[in-house]
Amino acid sequence: MRIPIVAGNWKMNKCTGDGAELAVAIARGLPAGTQGEVVVCPPAPALSAVAAALAGSRVALGAQNMHWEASGAYTGEMSAEMLKDVGCRYVILGHSERRQYFGETDEGVNRKAMAALAAGLVPIVCVGETLEQRESDQTAAVITTQVRGSLAGIAADELRKLVVAYEPVWAIGTGRTASPAQAQEVHALIRGLLAGISDAETAAAVRLQYGGSVKADNAAELFGQPDIDGGLIGGAALTAESFLAIVQAAG
Ligand code: PEP
């Protein structure tokens, strides 16, 4: 009943030319019978070129960050309206690299998620524990704080529109993937938390992605878990071949 969603986070890779080329290759190579949503999230300077490359295809465009304010003196920032203006339908919020290197907090992610929803963008809200936190048995506590903090005050009808990505920090870009059982355990926790802040029906409707070294050869088993509805893909999203194999695994 939940439509799978696979999103490629290109991070700080690809300019307009090679970004558009990759987008075209993904759009053209989409496996026949793909039912799920497919999203690519290029860096901001390539958004317009990728939007043009995707025109008429069923691959959607997303951004990697945005500001919560609509406009004003916020040098270097982009608003939800600006992202919509270049054709974005999705925006990744609170990625662990933004939390780690740019000081993003749950409170800031919460403000961004509300602003994105108000503007009609679908936020992909990222949560995940570090290796140190996992090894000291703090995973559940960290995820609980991040989910409650990042999604505070979002009404049930808005909550069901967004996507939550569980990305254990120790699995991002490391080649080390959470086992399907480890990932499922945290996804089930997140769904329970969503039920606590809204209701069981809403929680059952929210898509939960897994992210962290997803590759063609581990995607199917991860996506086969009952609470995993697709993936947020980093490194393997940078070539059409590997990304499309993951899209295929999601169905
Ligand atoms: C990510 O950064 O969102 C990610 C999941 O990266 P990778 O797939 O490279 O681990």
Image (cartoon, helix red, strand yellow):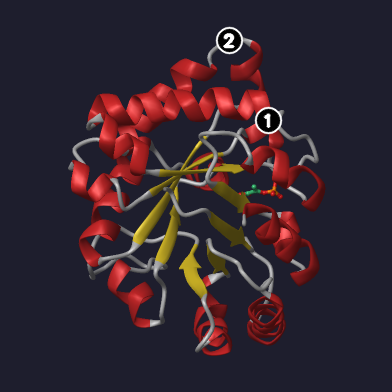
Q: Position of residue 109 (x, y in %)?
A: 35, 45
Q: Is residue 70 left or right of residue 41?
A: left
User: Quick check: is the Cβ at mark 1 less than 8 Å away from ligand 1?
Assistant: no
Mark 1 vs 2: CB contact within 8 A: no
Q: Residue at x 41, y 73 (%)?
A: 88
Q: Position of residue 194 (x, y in %)?
A: 32, 31
Depicted 195 relative to depicted 27: above or below: above
Q: Is residue 57 left or right of residue 240?
A: left
- Mark 1 crowdedness (10 Å alpha carbons): few <14, some 14-19, many ≥20: some
Q: Quadrant of residue 9?
A: bottom right
Residue 117 seen anywhere in this rendered image of the structure: yes
Q: Quadrant of residue 42?
A: bottom right
Secondary structure of the residue carrying tag 1 is helix
- Give the amino acid type for the residue marked by disc 1 in the picture: Pro
Secondary structure of the residue carrying tag 2 is loop
Mark 1, residue position: 180
Q: Residue furthest top?
A: 136
Residue 213 seen anywhere in this rendered image of the structure: no
Q: Residue at x 72, y 63 (%)?
A: 243
User: Quick check: is the Cβ at mark 2 less than 8 Å away from ligand 1?
Assistant: no
Depicted 136 relative to depicted 225: above or below: above
Q: Could you tell which of marks 1 and 2 lies nearer the N-terminus?
A: 2
Q: Is residue 134 left or right of residue 152?
A: right
Q: Position of residue 189 (x, y in %)?
A: 45, 23
- Give the amino acid type for the residue marked by disc 2 in the picture: Asp
Q: Nearer the viewer, residue 199 or 123?
A: 199
Mark 2, residue position: 137
- Mark 2 crowdedness (10 Å alpha carbons): few <14, some 14-19, many ≥20: few
Q: Give the CA distance from mark 1 to mark 2.
A: 18 Å
